[in-house]
Image (tube, helix red, strand yellow):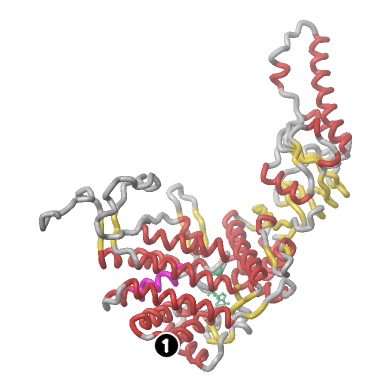
């Protein structure tokens, strides 16, 4: 036994540490700050943010996850909210702002409960129950969607894009998204669908206008043919993919040459020429009419290829070579000598086309019909980048809707339905958890509240009329942010995949619960984590401070 009053010092003196409610409130404040940072961007009437880094580079966006990825966040609890945004982005492809502000609101409501001396574990338990129930509610209000329901899928795409600045071209981009995703979707034996978005190539080319953005059946390589004497289009193209240079390494000659008379020089040049000729002959003999070369192609080889009527592209990116292989069914050959007709890929048409300032190569009608690309155009780099982010959102939501086969209505309608159901549910649970479930219900209303705030509406009036409609049984009543009226979101075409909602609920709940349960924040030594923390006794302080 230790003499009474003896303190064991396990932490070095001066270690930064915060415990109990102080730690909780500090964490909650940090998380709320992150939520506040993105709040004003929610919804079609949300604002954009301009992010400027230390080098002066500027990103203008409305995209929750982009904003949070770009800003420097130090506080560990705040970082957890950034993780929420990332998870949401990976799992559902949209709804990042929603997930973050929901997590912030759950914590804000929890703070009130902690102040009333309700223990965080009770709040956590109540939140878990509420989150389960909320997801059930979403299942119940969802409706079915199939891959052939192009109209609904287009609405899903447009809803996801409605808050982006490129939304002036929503129709076109939505149409492209739906066609692209429907092409790459693959049916599973059980009749459900899966979408591998890696099969969708996105190429950005600054210039023109957003309206010139197009869906290309096949692959785009941002390179021109190497010689003007080559055909600028090849039909029924057999395609060689080569990861080897069509060059004679200069050192092979330089190192040994010692020329004493002009005929000798000629002999060496002849030798080089015949080597290049043999390379081109290998390509010709394989039957290839097009060659994509990952390395260089010598001028002379270019000349011979042109004479053979072969379309050649050099220094193609490795990632493009991989895409070409997948799309055309060809094999990337590393030794030119070994190139044979079995290695060749196929496309109905390979052609060169001028896009903006540059010539690009289009490989269309590929052997693999699932190869499609989107060529993004736009006046400036910022526009092109924001269109890319819009398309990322719209293609993901379409993919997710096809995969799950279920959609819900947005504009705060589903959130309202959840709040209503949770308040009923809370009274059946009773006790202190009831208060946590009611707090969850209040927190979910942050979605319609923020949508109306951002639209310049009176959030209180809006929420009151919204609640009234839902009580009457209008499950899809939401906020028309343009007219300021409460209306049926199905009629307004505000439709989202169910996963955007369910994922936002689960990741926001997870983060809130995790942050709530922390009652001890200890500054760990830099770089110690990952070494196994093998220093005896350090954990023996009685507190079970969670690690970040
Ligand atoms: P997030 O990053 O969460 O996707 P957004 O800025 O894209 O944030 O806003 C999404 C919210 O805007 C969703 O609640 C969605 O239902 C809502 N929304 C989208 N289009 C409309 C619309 N036309 N009217 C009302 N609400 C809309
Ligand atoms: Mg969105």
Give the quarter of the figure containing the C terminus. bottom left
Q: Which residue is mark 1?
A: 428
- Above or below residue 351? Residue 229 is above
Q: Nearer the viewer, residue 373 or 439?
A: 439
383 relative position to 351: left or right: left
Does label 1 point to a residue whose CB lies under 8 Å from ligand 1?
no
The residue located at (49%, 76%) in the rendering is 132
Dividing the image into four equal quarters, which quarter contains ligand 2?
A: bottom right
Q: Position of residue 258 (x, y in %)?
A: 73, 8
5 relative position to 118: left or right: left
The residue located at (71%, 76%) in the rendering is 151
Residue 292 drawn in magenta: no
Q: Position of residue 407 (x, y in %)?
A: 62, 76
- Above or below residue 113? Residue 395 is above
Q: Tell me if I can see residue 475 in this picture.
A: yes
191 relative position to 394: left or right: right
Q: Residues within 10 Å of mark 1 (few under 14, many from 20)?
A: few
Q: Residue furthest top?
A: 260
Q: Residue furthest front?
A: 1
Instruction: Read off the magenta span.
Output: 100-110
49 relative position to 156: left or right: left
Residue 542 picture quarter: bottom left
Q: Tell me if I can see residue 481 in this picture.
A: no
- Above or below residue 237? Residue 283 is above
- Numbered marks: total: 1
Tell me the chief SS of the magenta region.
Answer: helix
Q: Residue furthest bottom?
A: 472
The residue located at (70%, 67%) in the rendering is 193
Give the quarter of the figure containing the N terminus. bottom left
């Amino acid at each position: 036994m230790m003499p009474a009053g003896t303190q064991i010092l396990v932490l070095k003196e001066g270690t930064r540490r915060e415990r109990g409610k102080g730690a909780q409130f500090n964490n909650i404040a940090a998380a709320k700050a992150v939520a506040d940072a993105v709040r004003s961007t929610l919804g079609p009437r949300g604002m954009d943010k301009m992010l400027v880094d230390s080098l002066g580079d500027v990103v203008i966006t409305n995209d929750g996850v982009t904003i949070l990825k770009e800003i420097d966040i130090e506080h560990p609890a705040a970082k957890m909210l950034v993780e929420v945004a990332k998870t949401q982005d990976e799992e559902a492809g949209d709804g990042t702002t929603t997930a973050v502000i929901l997590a912030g609101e759950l914590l804000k409501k929890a703070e009130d409960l902690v102040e009333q001396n309700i223990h965080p574990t009770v709040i956590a338990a109540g939140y878990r129950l509420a989150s389960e129930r909320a997801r059930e509610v979403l299942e119940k209000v969802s409706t079915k969607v199939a891959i052939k329901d192009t109209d609904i899928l287009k609405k899903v795409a447009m809803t996801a894009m409605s808050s982006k600045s490129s939304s002036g071209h929503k129709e076109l981009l939505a149409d492209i998204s739906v066609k692209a995703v429907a092409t790459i979707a693959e049916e599973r034996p059980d009749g459900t669908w899966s979408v591998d978005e890696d099969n969708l190539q996105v190429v950005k080319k600054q210039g023109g206008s957003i309206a010139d953005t197009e869906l290309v059946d096949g692959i785009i390589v941002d390179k021109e043919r190497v010689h003007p004497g080559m055909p600028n289009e090849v039909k029924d193209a057999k395609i060689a993919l080569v990861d080897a240079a069509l060059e004679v390494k200069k050192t092979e000659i330089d190192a040994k040459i010692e020329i004493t008379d002009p005929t000798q020089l000629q002999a060496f040049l002849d030798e080089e020429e015949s080597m290049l000729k043999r390379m081109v002959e290998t390509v010709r003999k394989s039957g290839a009419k097009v060659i994509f070369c990952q390395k260089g192609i010598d001028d002379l080889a270019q000349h011979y290829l042109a004479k053979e009527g072969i379309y050649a592209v050099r220094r193609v990116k490795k990632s493009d070579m991989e895409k070409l292989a997948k799309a055309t069914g060809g094999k990337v050959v590393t030794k030119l000598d070994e190139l044979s007709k079995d290695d060749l890929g196929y496309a109905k048409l390979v052609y060169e086309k001028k896009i903006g300032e540059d010539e690009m190569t289009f490989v269309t009608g590929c052997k693999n019909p699932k190869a499609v690309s989107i060529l993004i155009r736009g006046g400036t780099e910022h526009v092109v980048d924001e269109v890319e982010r819009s398309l990322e959102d719209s293609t993901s939501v379409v993919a997710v809707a096809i995969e799950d086969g279920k959609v819900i209505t947005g504009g705060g309608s589903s959130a309202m339905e959840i709040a209503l159901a949770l308040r009923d549910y809370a009274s059946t649970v009773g006790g202190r958890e009831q208060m946590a479930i009611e707090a969850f219900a209040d927190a979910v209303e942050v979605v319609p509240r923020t949508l109306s705030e951002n639209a310049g509406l009176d959030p209180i009036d809006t929420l009151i009329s919204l609640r009234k409609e839902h009580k009457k049984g209008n499950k899809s009543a939401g906020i028309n942010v343009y007219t300021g009226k409460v209306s049926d979101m199905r009629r307004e075409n505000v439709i989202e995949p169910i996963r955007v909602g369910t994922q936002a609920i689960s990741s926001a709940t997870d983060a809130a619960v995790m942050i709530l349960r922390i009652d001890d924040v200890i500054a760990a030594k830099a770089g110690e984590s990952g070494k196994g923390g093998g220093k005896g006794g350090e954990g023996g302080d009685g507190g079970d401070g969670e690690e970040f």
